[in-house]
Image (tube, rainbow, N blue to C red):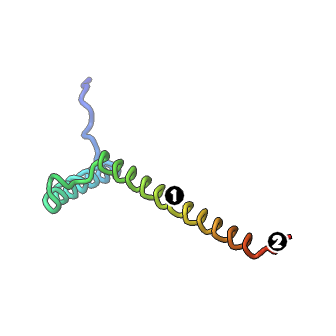
Amino acid sequence: MSNVEPNPTIRLTTISRTVASLAVGVVHTLERAVVGDGRIRTARGNAWEAVCADRARADQRAELDRLVAELVATRAAAARERQPVG
């Protein structure tokens, strides 16, 4: 008796993983060549961009809230001026 296993077969999933792995390698190399090492997107860079975008949205919301409050105050003042006294 022999403990030698039969030749392993190549399955569809093996080919898919190999192709995907090669594609990722090509994209990574291409990105590095096109944009340079200093501008490659990383998880840290993506997270920082998300933080900056959240801050910008918060600033925009605060500005809009300020404008709405100013508009409400202006309308309230105008309504008080129009009311007859006494």
Q: Which mark is residue 7?
A: none
The residue furthest front is: 86
Q: Does residue 56 appear to the left or right of 26 in the view shown? A: right
Q: Tell me which corner region of the image, top left, top right, bottom left or bottom right, holds residue 65.
A: bottom right
Q: Quadrant of the N terminus?
A: top left
Instruction: Name the one closer to the observer, 26 or 56.
Output: 56
Question: What residue is drawn where x is 51% and y is 57%?
Answer: 62
- Residue 55's x, y, as percent? 43, 53
Badge 2 is on which residue?
85
- Residue 59's x, y, as percent? 46, 57
Instruction: Name the one closer to the observer, 48 or 70.
Output: 70
Q: What secondary structure is found at the residue carrying circle 2?
A: loop
Q: Earlier in the sequence, mark 2 or mark 1?
A: 1
Label 2, label 1: how far apart the Cα atoms are: 36 Å
Label 1 packing within 10 angstroms: few (<14), some (14-19), many (20+): few
Question: What residue is drawn where x is 55% and y is 61%?
Answer: 66
Question: What residue is drawn where x is 27% and y is 41%?
Answer: 8
Q: Is residue 36 above or below residue 47?
A: below
Q: Tell me which corner region of the image, top left, top right, bottom left or bottom right, holds residue 34.
A: bottom left
- Residue 73's x, y, as percent? 64, 65
Q: Quadrant of the C terminus?
A: bottom right
Instruction: Name the one closer to the observer, 36 or 55.
Output: 55
Badge 1 is on which residue?
62
Q: What secondary structure is found at the residue carrying circle 1?
A: helix
Question: What residue is drawn where x is 72% and y is 73%?
Answer: 81
- The amino acid sitting under disc 1 is Ala
- The amino acid sitting under disc 2 is Val
Q: Is residue 64 above or below residue 43?
A: below
Label 2 packing within 10 angstroms: few (<14), some (14-19), many (20+): few
Q: Are marks 2 and 1 in contact (CB under 8 Å)?
A: no
